[in-house]
Image: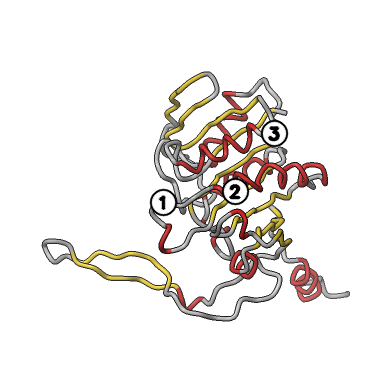
Amino acid sequence: MRILVTNDDGFHSPGIEACIRIACELSDDVWMVAPEFDQSGVAHSLSLSDPLRLRKIDERRFVVKGTPTDCVIMAVRHILADMKIGLVLSGVNKGQNIAEDVTYSGTVAGAMEGTILGIPSIALSQCYTPATRDNPSYSVAEKYGPNLIRRLLKTGMPEGVLVNVNFPACKPEEVVGIAITTQGKRDPELLRIEQRFDGRHNPYYWIGFSRKQYDLPNGTDMQAVAQKRISVTPLRIDMTDEPLLTELAQVFAAPKK
């Protein structure tokens, strides 16, 4: 099985090296196509107004000056155009990708693009604590990732579905188990803008989240990682809301003559 590894933290990230080691537990045919620079938070964006610059590091490692989506397209349509890719692994991201994170995450977007192109795809993220933010450990992801991926592939990945995996911020021996979860939802009031001032007293701003304790809904990715469980969340590319679709079809139905 040929595996493509990408990420959004950039090719220099320790997380992508962890992802490559995970992939090498599954196959001896592992390729990396990753962003030149950190692309966290770019979501599923394409570089349509700028050229893509491709740099070859070695026979199976390439760097693209672009987004994770650009990287997957470059791999599938150019670098490996004549080769079948059996799996896309995106990560291991530095930090969680749970709840609304999945809409912003370049890591999830890398797996999303693989899914769109018809390849089984999995996003992998490693949670950290405030104390380990600067130097997170990927030991949980590396210990549990390979077997988890084997089980996902054995089960089968439906067309149009990717899997989002989040490893909890703890030691490997402290992991309680695996939880199959839904995508959570944070309190929107936590989102904030922080104003600061530069040396000339001109204002600039950071987007961030306030920290506070609140109830975590049962069965969500948020609850799972808080309980030291590995969160496994299937996500669909088709975002159509079927209940509202049915209701709107009735509301806008052509009147009977």
**Label 3 environment density (alpha carbons within 10 Å; few <14, some 14–19, many ≥20):** some
Residues under numbered marks 3 and 2 in contact, where contact means CB atoms less than 8 Å apart: no
Classify mark 1: residues with Cα within 10 Å, few (<14), some (14-19) or many (20+).
Answer: few
Quadrant (top left, top right, bottom left, bottom right) of the N terminus? top right
* Front residue of this view, candidates 204 and 213: 213
Most distant residue in the left direction: 200
Q: Amino acid at mark 1?
A: Asn
The quarter of the picture where the C terminus appears is bottom right
110 w.r.t. 25: above or below? below
**Residue 37, percent across and down?**
39, 40
Give the percent coordinates (x, y) of residue 150: 75, 41
Occupied quadrant, residue 132: bottom left
How far is the residue under mark 2 from the one under mark 1? Answer: 15 Å
- State how far apart marks 3 and 2 are (Cα): 14 Å
- Position in image of residue 189 (x %, y %): 47, 79
- Residues 165 and 36: in front is 165
Helix, strand or loop under label 3: loop
Furthest-front residue in view?
173
Secondary structure, mark 1, is loop
* Residue drawn at 58 percent across, 29 percent down: 75
Q: Are marks 2 and 1 in contact (CB under 8 Å)?
A: no
CA distance separating discs 3 and 1: 26 Å
Mark found first going from the N terminus, 2 or 1:
1
Picture layout, residue 43 above or below residue 206: above
Query: Decide: marks 3, 1 in contact (CB < 8 A)?
Result: no
Residue 26: mark in rendering: 3
Above-or-below relation of 64 to 97: above
- Tell me residue 179's x, y (percent): 72, 62
Q: Which residue is mark 2?
A: 141
Q: Amino acid at mark 3?
A: Leu
Residue placed under numbered mark 1 in the picture: 135
User: Identity of the amino acid at label 2?
Assistant: Ala
